[in-house]
Image (spheres, helix red, strand yellow):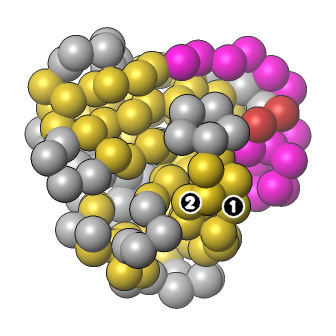
């Protein structure tokens, strides 16, 4: 299973074009972290870091769809024998700092800490189209506890 990399509220589950790395259709699950959530982020799967890219940007409210690419964000791709998972840390209106530890080539374990976003933000997780989604829109999820999907 793909575990939740963040505490928060599921605000989107949708099929979308992922433009930065995969350049194809994916299922995106967006998790909004309010100022009341823990903002430490974790790896959703075991694997190897294949891609890391930091992007400076604006600071729109993190639950807005345009914040996914317009706001400051950090993109990480973890791969293993079964799946590639892209997840994106997105800074919000109040959050002004993303901390991210991974480097390309690192071997990581599911549920290990990968970084944090300070004070209100969002994490988007991009999954293959055949992933079996295990969460609902409006559901509160906990990092390292809830399984977002199965592949």
Secondary structure found at label 2:
strand
Secondary structure found at label 1:
strand
| Placement of the C terminus among the 4 image quadrants | bottom left
Q: Residue at x 33, y 46 (%)?
A: 84
Horizontally, is 139 left or right of 51 in the view?
right
The location of residue 78, given as percent across then percent down, is: 31, 37
Give whichever of discs 2 and 1 has the lower sequence position.
1
Q: Are marks 2 and 1 in contact (CB under 8 Å)?
A: yes
The location of residue 53, given as percent across then percent down, is: 54, 18
The location of residue 147, given as percent across then percent down, is: 29, 72
Quickly name the residue at label 2: 26
- Residue 10 appearing in the image: yes
Residue 7 occupies quadrant:
bottom left
Mark 2 Cα shell of 10 Å, populated few (<14), some (14-19), many (≥20):
many
Residue 28 bears which disc, if any?
Answer: none
Q: Residue at x 85, y 26 (%)?
A: 58
Bounds of the magenta segment: 53-68
């Amino acid at each position: 299973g793909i575990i939740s990399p963040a505490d928060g509220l599921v605000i989107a589950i949708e099929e979308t074009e992922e433009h930065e790395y995969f350049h194809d259709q994916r299922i995106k699950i967006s998790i909004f972290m309010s100022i009341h959530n823990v903002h430490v982020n974790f790896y959703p799967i075991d694997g190897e870091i294949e891609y890391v890219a930091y992007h400076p940007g604006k600071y729109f409210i993190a639950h807005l769809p345009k914040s996914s690419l317009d706001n400051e964000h950090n993109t990480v791709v973890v791969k293993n024998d079964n799946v590639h998972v892209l997840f994106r840390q997105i800074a919000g209106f109040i959050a002004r700092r993303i901390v991210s530890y991974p480097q390309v080539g690192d071997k990581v374990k599911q549920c290990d800490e990968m970084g944090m976003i300070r004070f209100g933000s969002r994490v988007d997780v991009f999954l293959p189209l055949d992933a079996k989604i295990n969460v609902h829109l409006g559901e509160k999820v906990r990092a390292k506890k809830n399984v977002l999907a199965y592949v």
